[in-house]
């Protein structure tokens, strides 16, 4: 009879480059996490090789690969730490810092960019908005005077 551990290990494929143990059996929904006997495979791997998951903690994939069940790529952390690690580039603003041009295509450079309340603003776009507001107000005033 095959043991629990042997059954589990039969469902992984090792990645020699990254060191991940990729889960090749079932998955839980579209989340990308592996499923093993009604549990998430990475949690089973952590408990099998590292011990029980402390109360109040969840398992974080240090390799950022949801299919990985390598227990040395997993760490028990608080929800806050897990979320910060997973979304850090977006939450910390790295996503926006990597942008080199505004949505209208003007460059974010020293001449065209100003910082206002901690945010970058495109000077060219600000000028265009100011002109647009000026002409809208002027048109509204003319319509009121002629109306």
Image (cartoon, rainbow, N blue to C red):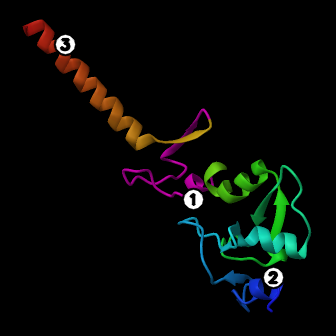
Q: Indicate left or right for 6 with 107 as reference.
A: right
**Quarter in which the C terminus is drawn:** top left
Q: Earlier in the sequence, mark 2 or mark 1?
A: 2
CB contact under 8 Å: marks 3 and 2: no
- Mark 1 crowdedness (10 Å alpha carbons): few <14, some 14-19, many ≥20: few
Q: Residue 141 shows which numbered tag?
A: 3
Q: Quadrant of the N terminus?
A: bottom right
Nearer to me, 25 or 128: 25
User: At which x and y percent is residue 97?
Assistant: 59, 54
- The residue nearer to you, when weighing 100 against 82, is 82
Q: In the rendered image, which quarter is residue 33 located in? A: bottom right
Q: Are marks 2 and 1 in contact (CB under 8 Å)?
A: no
Residue 137 image-quadrant placement = top left
Mark 2 crowd level (few <14, some 14–19, many ≥20, 10 Å Cα): few
Q: At x 75% / y 77%, what residue is drawn?
A: 69
Residue in the foreground of this view, choosing between 131 and 2? 2
CA gap between label 1 and label 3 equals 42 Å
Can residue 62 be seen here? The reply is no
Q: Which residue is mark 1?
A: 98
- Residue drawn at 58 percent across, 56 percent down: 95
In magenta, the rendered stretch is 93-117
Q: Quick one: SS at disc 3?
A: helix
Name the residue carrying label 2: 4
**Residue 91 in sight here:** yes
- Residue 112 point in image, percent of width and height: 48, 46
Label 2, label 1: how far apart the Cα atoms are: 47 Å
Count of numbered labels shown in the rendering = 3
């Amino acid at each position: 009879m095959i043991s629990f551990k042997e059954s589990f290990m039969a469902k992984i494929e090792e990645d020699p480059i990254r060191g991940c143990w990729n889960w090749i059996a079932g998955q839980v929904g579209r989340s990308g996490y592996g499923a093993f006997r009604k549990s998430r495979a990475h949690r089973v791997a952590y408990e099998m090789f590292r011990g029980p998951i402390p109360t109040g903690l969840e398992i974080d994939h240090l390799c950022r690969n949801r299919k990985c069940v390598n227990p040395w790529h997993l760490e028990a952390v608080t929800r806050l730490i897990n979320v910060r690690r997973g979304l850090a580039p977006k939450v910390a603003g790295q996503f926006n810092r990597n942008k080199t041009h505004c949505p209208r295509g003007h460059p974010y450079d020293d001449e065209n960019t100003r910082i206002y309340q901690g945010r970058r603003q495109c000077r060219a776009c600000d000028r265009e908005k100011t002109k647009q507001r000026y002409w809208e107000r002027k048109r509204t005033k003319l319509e009121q005077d002629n109306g």
